[in-house]
Amino acid sequence: MPTQARRQCIRCQAALVQPGRRGRPRMNYHSDACRRAHNRFKTVLGHGIEHEGLPLREVSALLAQFDYSVSHSTIGAWRNGDSMPSRASEGLVKALEWILRIPAGHLVRELAGIEEAVARLQRQVARRLNVTSEDDRLITTAVRDQCYIRTSLQRTDRKIWQRVVAHREQVDRYWVMYRVEGGRPARIKAGPNCTPGELLRGGHGVCATELRFLKPLRPDESYEFGYLMSYPHSDVEDLSIQRSVQAPLEHLSVAVQFEPHACPRKLSTSTWLRTDAPPEETAERCLSGRHTALLNLSNPDPGIYGFSWS
Ligand SMILES: [Zn+2]
């Protein structure tokens, strides 16, 4: 622990000039949000390194394979909470997630600003809907996600189909919140049974798109609609597709289709029922004759489900 107050916040590098409330100086952070995000970052990273049983030099060598040059002592400082990668290191942090089998986005979102941007946009959407939380108006009961990894076009297209049930009168729209890591632009196109509405842009690449239903729903009425989401690949090719299940779902299906000449050498399914632990279940999978891998789950427990490949 440093004996003197730092001059910069560990997470966001804001200058630390003001003492905290009640005259108590905040030693390392300029805000509670930064303190919480940094604690989560070092905890998740520490668990990942521990679970994979990798020496720090090995982690450093694996990062070098992704063209990131980071010394083992820097990684040690991140793990110990003495420092944190900057917002600009998102690609590197994404590679760390993949190496340590941490669900995609779980380290990245703790980088300065991202988590706050998500929360701000969620509040903005809730105000527009006049609710405190989206769950007050509708719940999603089934999701089908068909992902096409278009290596030759350097792009992923996901056709998403969703079934929702209204919880109250006059539910007539759904807001999709999304962010593609690395600040890459993602495009959403309304598909069957919905039309495009407003687009809200938060900071750090966080966006929300409104999909308007063709008619307002009555309480307990269910409705099916679809949309297409496309985003460009990063320099380090995208190596996973995941879906998070937060509330009980009747059905989840995720299919990933590759181009015939660009099939992965190794592909596995991973399930995280807790994000501070390694995947509970991983299984190597074979691709079907149509170069597709499929995951079909009924009543999945809350968690994160998906595929990763190399
Ligand atoms: Zn800060």
Image (cartoon, rainbow, N blue to C red):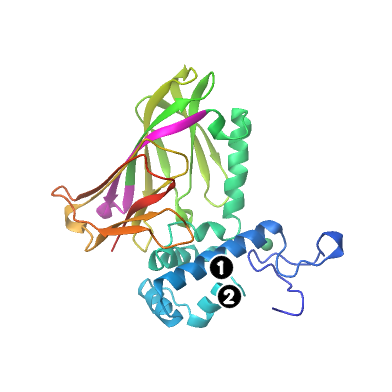
Name the residue that disc number 2 marks.
80
Q: Is residue 136 shown to the viewer in this render? A: yes
| Left or right: 3, with 60 as reference point | right
Q: Quadrant of ligand 1?
A: bottom right
Location of residue 198 in the rendering, given as x and y in whole percent from the top left corner:
52, 32
Q: What's the residue at 50%, 59% (across, down)?
A: 108
Q: What's the residue at 52%, 43% (across, down)?
A: 207
Q: Quadrant of the N terminus?
A: bottom right
The single residue placed furthest to the right in the displayed view is: 23
Name the residue that disc number 1 marks.
42
Q: Find residue 142 and report its image quarter.
A: top left
Q: Amino acid at mark 1?
A: Lys
Q: What's the residue at 48%, 17% (across, down)?
A: 218
Relative to 2, say whether 16 is above or below.
above
Q: What is the C-alpha distance between the residues marked 1 and 2?
A: 7 Å
| Left or right: 251, with 92 as reference point | left
Q: Is residue 232 shown to the viewer in this render? A: no
Q: In the depicted view, which residue is nearer to us: 295 or 149?
A: 295
